Amino acid sequence: MITLNPLRWGKQYESLEFNDVVHFDTGEPIARIGTVGGGIVGRDLRVAHKAREALLEVPTNELLQMCRKAAELFENETLPVGDSQQSVDDFIHQQSASTGLPEHMCRSNMSKNSFVLSNMEQILDCLTRGLDLSILSKGYGEEGRGVTVSYQAQTPILGAILPNNSPGVHTLWLPAIPMQIGLALKPGSQEPWTPYRMVSAFIEAGVPSAAFGLYPGGHDAGGAIMAKSARSMIFGSAQTIAQHAGNPKVQPHGPGFSKILLGDDIVDDWEMFLDVMVESVLSNSGRSCINCSGIWASRHTREIAAAIAERIGPVDVRPPSDPDAQLAAFTVPAMATGTYAMVQQDLAESGVTDMTAEYGEKLIEREHCAYLRPMVVHADSPDRGVAAKEYMFPFVSVVECPQDQMLSRIGTSLIGTVITSDEKFIQDAARCVDIDRLNIGPLPTNRLNWLQPHEGNIIEFLFTNRAYQIEPMPAITSV
């Protein structure tokens, strides 16, 4: 059984206490993780400046080359992880076994992380709008217009409290290393695999090991990272997001409430876009913030909901090794039962209809885990409570709403796919402050362009643009 030890600025730490990582279906231990408390994390973060200093010793162009090498190692090679040598197949099996994700979804998320890492040069070029990255290292420089620009790092390290539900989110902290910002990561208790393997790939590719801290543990370990890091990111629920709203030191990532809006000009031909809607809802077992939780149209909403239900309603539980498996397990059964209870409350409201009712039981309970099969509900008005809900399984509400009210009623939406040729609707969507990422046309909500910022530009989060003026010193003649 593999043992994962904490990593304290590149040095493995022998913990006194360990937690087991168990198989989601059998309950059998598959790994053990050494834990640390908040005191150790706090002591380490007092010397966090050394992580950035180690990275500043390596030119940015070399770090970018190391990122490409790390991407190749991460996706294709056997790497030292914990006290073992971990093959790609080991990684896929272990991640699936602890998270409940089907193996092909684990492999897909692995490829996504590798793609971002291997294309880091182009991604940073877009996020910085073509800025010479040496300016981030030096702190100032000439950008080509005869003007000195300056970017000041706001932190020597990026702290991150990592989640369990979707390994694809790890793409969000990867750009820190080529920007010469160290990492203090608290791995998810059920998904430590990606951060451990990625850090191993970075180190094997030549990135200084002193740039990395991995701190598995309880809430006190996460709390210490949040308290002692000048910049950190956290993944969690809507309550977590609200808790950190307005805090410039924290970049919170939570539910996406992503939506598809069908314009009046095309809604009569909605069947042309059925594949887009189905993919947006069902991909990655509905686990991602970029999955579609709401489809809004002014008419044909019952027909749309029925058609989606016909496509995804029959989807059933399959073994995680099945390449056609489309559902992930809830590794904590109470989360599934609690979620299902909330859905039942939604369905009790007048004007809300379960369009997948005919496709059998939705809550599948097992001894150590549970599943929720896909659900499509119809809401006859945006006033229905379900129109503002998002759940961590393939769930979507199809909402009937006049087009001229959609943008004022949809609420916060990480992704907004607006399918229309109506120029006024497009302009109105572009001005809508409730949509973060805007797709115009039949783009599934789950298909991201990595050359675009996702939930805030990490450059702007880690660096501050400031004025920087230089006046040549006069010659001084000694007397």
Image (spheres, rainbow, N blue to C red):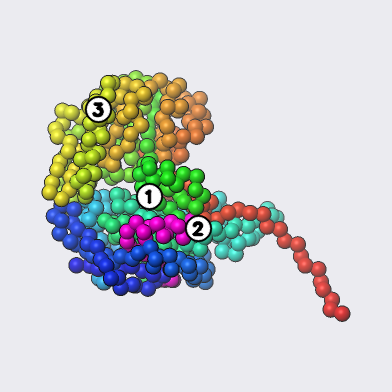
User: Mark 2 packing: few (<14 Cα in 10 Å), some, or many (20+)?
Assistant: some
Q: Amino acid at mark 1?
A: Phe
Q: Is residue 114 at all visible to an observer of this figure?
A: no
Q: What secondary structure is found at the residue carrying circle 3?
A: helix
- Spatial CA span between label 3 and label 1: 28 Å
Tell me if residue 223 is in the magenta stretch: yes
> Which residue is depicted at the point 22% across and 42% down?
336
> Which residue is depicted at the point 87% across and 80% down?
479
Q: Which residue is mark 2?
A: 230
N-terminal of the pair, mark 2 or mark 3, is 2
Q: What secondary structure is found at the residue carrying circle 1?
A: strand
Q: Which residue is mark 1?
A: 235
The total of numbered circles placed on residues is 3
> Which residue is depicted at the point 51% across and 67% down?
49
- Spatial CA span between label 1 and label 2: 17 Å
Tell me if residue 115 is in the magenta stretch: no
